[in-house]
Image (tube, grey):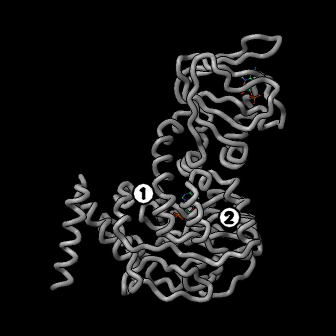
């Protein structure tokens, strides 16, 4: 009874301090957070597992159940090998009973593995809102959470340094947060054909792919590839929802795994805000109509906003090109040396693609026309990796050829 009273008193104190608008959601997050942080409820690690374990109840059941009542994991509960690579076993998609990894006969993502994957139908679009844990980061201040700290060799640090320099996700972090994330990362080498994440599982780790390639499969259908430098496994951690896709290495991969709590504490808030901020706008950009909502989210992760005033030169003809731009608000004009005014661009239009597509200097000068023009920019790396099928549309719409 004393324990119960203590818990209720602690909760009441938190409630009076934070005064949340949604008391039920706050309480749900408060207890989920407590459970996830209680080491007594985490299973002991295995040889292949990173030191932090996925959040589970004492009985081994996932903590983060469907808030609408049902347990999203239920259909898989009789499956003997539901775990991802960092749980019980390495499983081969063609033989889930096997703990051994066997290379896939046919690495072509469209054929070989898709048919063997997740039999359970699952709606990857279903989302539980990002919980108060994220929108209310002070909730963490009171807890005794300590991030994992791994022993990294100089060689590993050097490689991580390269990844961090190229990654928009990390470049947004303050020094201390970045250091915490780096030392919490754990290197994992996985051979081709390994099921890294299984659709429907609970979320445990977020992954950064240093080298190799992974394939995403949703309800048995291949949805795309992640290339070196990309990240995955964030959705289940952001929304406390089951894994939305199965992820299989289609080449030998070097991965870095970040535990759920470190992801939530350090990377979640920025990611969720950025996705929410840009999603409405990106949906209305004609050239991005061919992207699905997940591809739009990944694009949002990489965008930066910039504002210019009337007369400012955003791009100068002849200079090297580093960024691609979408206009979020206002208008810009395009001029070309010797030819004069070429075009006026407005909301939802883009510019700066030619230099990046063709590895050429800028082909024109772009100047802000409105008093204030808001643009979102994507760097070269993001341009090459995140526009997917939109790249073909950009090539077809080359303004110098039409
Ligand atoms: N089309 C897609 N739908 C859902 N998840 C995807 C898709 N493509 C890639 N993924 C990634 O696959 C991951 C599976 O685990 P998560 O749901 O945690 O996060 C998911 C995303 O990072
Ligand atoms: N007629 C045009 N010729 C060249 N660039 C144009 C023209 N119209 C619009 N632009 C845009 O102006 C941009 C200048 O930088 P980029 O050459 O990278 O990409 C160019 C196009 O996006």
Residue 111 x, y percent position in the rendering: 70, 65
Nearer the observer: mark 2 or 1; the answer is 2
Q: Report the Cα–Cα distance between label 2 and label 1.
A: 25 Å
Point out the quarter of the image occupied by ligand 1: bottom right
Residue bearing mark 2? 209
> 381 or 166: which is nearer to us?
166
Q: Is mark 1 within 8 Å of ligand 1?
A: no
Residue bearing mark 1? 126
Image quarter of residue 17? bottom left
Q: Is residue 316 left or right of residue 261?
A: right
Sequence-earlier tag: 2 or 1:
1
Q: Is mark 2 within 8 Å of ligand 1?
A: no
Q: How would you rate the neighbour count of disc 1 (Cα within 10 Å): few for under 14, some for 14-19, many for 20 or more?
A: few
Residue for point 49% across, 42% down: 279
Residue 243 x, y percent position in the rendering: 50, 67
Q: SS class of the residue under badge 2?
A: strand
């Amino acid at each position: 009874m004393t324990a119960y009273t203590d818990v209720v008193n602690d909760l009441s104190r938190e409630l009076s301090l934070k005064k949340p608008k949604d008391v039920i959601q706050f309480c749900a997050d408060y207890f989920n957070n407590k459970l996830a942080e209680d080491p007594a409820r985490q299973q002991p690690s295995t040889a292949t597992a990173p030191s932090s374990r996925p959040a589970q109840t004492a009985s081994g059941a996932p903590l983060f159940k469907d808030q609408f009542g049902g347990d999203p994991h239920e259909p898989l509960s009789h499956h003997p090998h539901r775990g991802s690579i960092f749980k019980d076993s390495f499983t081969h998609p063609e033989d889930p009973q096997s703990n051994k990894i066997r290379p896939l006969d046919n690495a072509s993502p469209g054929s070989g593995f898709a048919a063997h994957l997740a039999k359970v139908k699952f709606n990857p679009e279903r989302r539980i809102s990002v919980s108060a844990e994220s929108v209310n980061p002070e909730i963490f201040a009171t807890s005794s959470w300590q991030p994992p700290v791994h022993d990294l060799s100089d060689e590993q640090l050097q490689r991580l340094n390269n990844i961090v320099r190229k990654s928009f996700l990390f470049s947004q972090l303050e020094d201390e947060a970045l250091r915490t994330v780096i030392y919490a990362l754990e290197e994992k080498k996985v051979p081709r054909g390994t099921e890294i994440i299984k659709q429907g599982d609970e979320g445990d780790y977020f992954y950064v792919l240093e080298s190799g390639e992974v394939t995403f499969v949703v309800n048995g259908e291949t949805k795309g590839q992640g290339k070196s430098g990309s990240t995955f496994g964030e959705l289940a951690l952001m929304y406390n929802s089951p894994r939305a896709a199965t992820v299989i290495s289609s080449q030998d991969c070097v991965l870095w795994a970040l535990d759920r709590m470190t992801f939530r504490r350090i990377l979640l808030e920025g990611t969720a805000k950025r996705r929410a901020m840009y999603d409405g706008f990106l949906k209305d950009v004609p050239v991005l109509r061919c992207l699905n909502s997940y591809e739009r989210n990944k694009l949002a992760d990489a965008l930066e906003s910039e504002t210019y005033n009337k007369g400012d030169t955003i791009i100068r003809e002849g200079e090297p090109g580093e960024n691609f731009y979408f206009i979020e608000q206002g208008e810009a004009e395009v001029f070309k040396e010797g030819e004069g005014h070429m075009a006026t661009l407005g909301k939802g239009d883009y510019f700066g693609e030619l230099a990046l597509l063709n590895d050429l200097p800028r082909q024109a000068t772009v100047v802000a026309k409105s008093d204030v023009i808001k643009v979102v920019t994507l760097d070269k790396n993001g341009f090459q990796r995140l526009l997917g099928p939109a790249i073909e549309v950009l090539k077809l719409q080359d303004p110098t050829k039409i």
